[in-house]
Amino acid sequence: MPSSPSYSPFGSIIDRDILSDILIPELYPQPPPSDAVIVNPPSPAPNKAMIFFAKQAVSSFINAVTLAEGSRLEDTLRFLTLWFKHGDQVEVFETIKESLKLLPVEMWLEVIPQLMARLDSKQNVAQLIKEVVIDLSKVHPQSLVYALTVAAKSANLRRSAVATEILTIMSDSQSTLVEQARLVSDELIRCAILWHEQWHEALDDASRLYFQDKNVKAMFDLLKPLHDLIDRGATTLKEQSFKQTYENELKEAWNACRCYLRSQNAKELNQAWDLYYIVFRKISSQLRQLTSLDLNYVSPRLVKARDLELAVPGTYDPSAPLVTISSINNTLQVINSKQRPRKVVMKGSDGKDYIFLLKGHEDPRQDERVMQLFGLVNTLLLHQGDTSRRNLTIQRYSIIALNQNSGLIGWVPNCDTLHSLIRDYREKKGILLSMEHKIMQSFAHDLDQMTLLQKVQVFHHALEMTSGNDLQQILWLKSPNSEIWFDRRTNYTRSMACMSMVGYILGLGDRHPSNLMLDRISGKIVHIDFGDCFEVAMTREKFPEKIPFRLTRMLIQAMEATGIEGNYRITCERVLRVLRSNKESLLAVLEAFVYDPLINWRLMEAGGRRPPPETLQKDGQTDSKAESSLKRIKQKLAGRDFNPNVEFSIPEQVSLLIEQAVLAENLCQCYIGWCPFW
């Protein structure tokens, strides 16, 4: 009588006898008899077990994806991880190739960033990815055209070539769409970082390379592309203005640099830097006065771009009517912050205004991946009764990369940063914005040179001398009645708790008051800028963070009477319970995250801000750091983050985290701009 079929761990029905035949003789050779004479030990089997299980896993994930209803994100990402890791094995490759024919093309819409990141993979893998992307482009060209336009600009020649080839194929049927995407992308990049800003940033970095690092070659490598840019000529009135104002001084400085290359006389470089410094000061003065940009001066081509076929960035939804760009507002407001982002208003074909923040100087692709994670977390929270009833979802917004250091970020309406709220409140009350810092400085000089015990003493002194009730008062004063105030306070506390737990799992750092916003209507806390993930802020050379999330006294006082011992703690426990019980789904997204070749370079740089050359190849060091980050996340999701040998319960884990977050010894070590006293 044949044995009854049994289910393998991978979901396929396999006869026990067949499985026995496969596994025992071939994949796991039996040891020789104890009395056998061994001349040469047998060599290990050539990865047959790995290939067998990889094929089984591929088939099972294909089944999971095709049978799933709603979002398939975690299963799709697991499938992609298998594909990218084992797709160069011939048997696995053939299984994947056949399986792809069974999949609905729409499933790839959720993982376009991951597909773009792997266009330069090994030959077999890259070829299949290209076929998938081409198939997707035929059905959903609007979903891909921005991403492919970015990939075509990549410094990685292989990725650029594949993306350009796909765009060429798309042009056969969608030539206008492809051209419009190129135009909008190129011109928005031009608006994101003016020549003035490129030179200001480059001169600042080059001076550091020369005067601090004594690295003349790196200085030359940084400045040469910008001199070449001027030589190529200006294309807008703004660029012509820059050229007329600074060309002579910059040419003279560059000539002095080239003289140095011939003579090796340091006087030549000093002369060059005298001129560069003059230019730097003039540009600094101009940038301080920059409050708006007229598109007629910075990008006349965007002014003429009307009634396009191209969708408004971030709005494409295959199940909804297509909204295309009708026009772009002629005036870009420049936000008064360090990077001077622009507020861009696009008029959609539906008559609505779509507002974006156009940011330069930063790589937006990590924020894009974080939004993927938040999408999954929201799905998990909505499917759990305890959390769905309490509206525990994270505010998401669209992110569209334009190149490796600029992008569009969907404008979050009705929100103000905590920093701006506190600044406005203190201005009206006649309180010095930096009151706590001033008290600390008057109590003790050279704060950075103090011992930890001294820092704690000074920190406590500043807290004792100030009330710290600014945010509490802001919530109260901005509410029209007590009922709305109560609802907002509840939403505030719960959203704080939710992001405390999710941010902790993600290793999210740099939560200073300008990276937290308060929704004026709902009272929810909204987080922005996700550049520091996977605890890189904790490994910074200067001012490494010691806290798991921001939970300072102002935030606690705004929770009112119960502080952390009410809604906050209960919500933390509920959210952490959902995260821990769905750890496999979260790990699917986070694993794809840390091994993404466009993202994981950040793991190598604490607080990594500047994009690296995209030609960097994945190496053992990066893989090791990725594995370490993933191991740390697994420990957090298992309750073993404080002691790998002890699994803490959810209430215990939350208590330990809150204790670390409010500890004065940890807070006083943050840099002053983080405002630990707020």
Image (cartoon, helix red, strand yellow):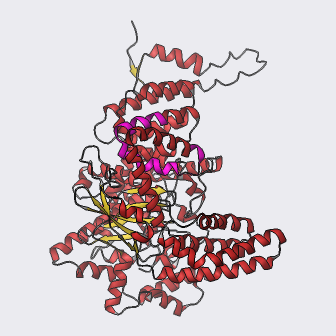
The answer to which quarter of the image holds residue 515 is bottom left
Q: In the figure, 80 relative to 32: above or below?
A: below
Check residue 136 for magenta coloring: yes
The C terminus, quarter of image: bottom left
The N terminus, quarter of image: top left
Q: In the figure, 219 relative to 266: above or below?
A: above
State whether the magenta stretch is mostly helix, strand or loop.
helix
Q: Residue at the spot x=30%, y=76% of the render?
A: 558
Q: Specify the segment rendered in magenta.
A: 129-158
Q: Position of residue 354 (x, y in %)?
A: 29, 62
The answer to whether residue 333 is left or right of residue 97 is: left
Q: Residue at the spot x=57%, y=31% of the render?
A: 88
Q: Position of residue 150 (x, y in %)?
A: 48, 51
The answer to whether residue 434 is left or right of residue 224 is: left
Q: Position of residue 20 (x, y in %)?
A: 51, 16
The answer to whether residue 270 is left or right of residue 664 is: right
Tell me, yes or no, if residue 408 can be seen here.
yes
